[in-house]
Amino acid sequence: QVQLVESGGGLVQPGGSLSLSCAASGSINSRSTMGWYRQAPGKERDLVAVIRYGGSTNYADSVKGRFTISRDIAMNTAYLQMSSLKPEDTAVYYCYADVNVLGSIRRSWGQGTQVTVSS
């Protein structure tokens, strides 16, 4: 099993920046995919960014050019650097990790961290 602990959420003004961290422990390895989803009140959980083995990344259109996902393999930690934040970025952000277990992908989730963008 994989345990994920997020940190770094909080309140920020529009146009500001915030960095989230996701520390993984357990059966995580360098080949695991990690990423971030977010869920605003009354809305579905949507993919924000993903980083795969080898370092390839994908982003939701709404955050391209503003958010950057990265990963420290040695520390088993993923990061989400968010800049030029907008009120519509307000949501609970969830980290996830996909681990290949005997040919099956198992997804683990963090507990979520609140990001509020407001003046």
Image (cartoon, grey):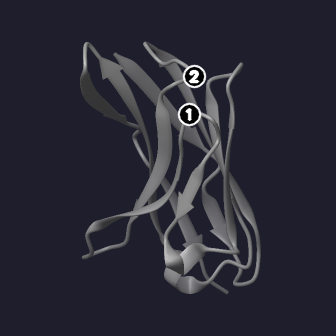
Residue 90 left/right relative to 85: left
Disc with the residue nearer the chain's start (2 vs 1): 2
Percent x, y of residue 19:
71, 54
Residue 40 left/right relative to 8: left
User: Which residue shows up at 77% across the image and 75% down it?
Assistant: 16
Give the camera-side residue of 25 and 71. 71
Percent x, y of residue 55:
65, 41
Give the camera-side residue of 65 and 118. 65
Numbered label attached to residue 18:
none
User: Which residue shows up at 56% across the image and 71% down it?
Assistant: 116
Question: What type is the residue that disc 2 sits on?
Answer: Ser
User: Which residue shows up at 41% across the image and 38% down it?
Assistant: 110
Numbered label attached to residue 30:
2
Percent x, y of residue 15:
75, 83
Tell me if residue 5 comes above or below residue 51 in the rendering.
Answer: above
Quarter of the image where one finds residue 7: top right
The Cα atoms of the two marked residues, 2 and 1, are separated by 6 Å
Quarter of the image where one finds residue 53: top right
SS of the residue at dot 1? loop
Within-10-Å neighbours for mark 1: few <14, some 14–19, many 20+: some
**Contact? badges 2 and 1 (CB < 8 Å):** yes
User: Which residue shows up at 51% across the image and 78% down it?
Assistant: 61
SS of the residue at dot 2? loop
Question: What type is the residue that disc 1 sits on?
Answer: Tyr
Residue 95 left/right relative to 86: left
- Indicate the quadrant containing the N terminus: top left, top right, bottom left or bottom right: top left
Tell me if residue 75 comes above or below residue 61 in the rendering.
Answer: above
Within-10-Å neighbours for mark 2: few <14, some 14–19, many 20+: some
Give the camera-side residue of 101 and 20. 101
- Indicate the quadrant containing the C terminus: top left, top right, bottom left or bottom right: bottom right
In the picture of the structure, the residue carrying the numbered disc 1 is 53
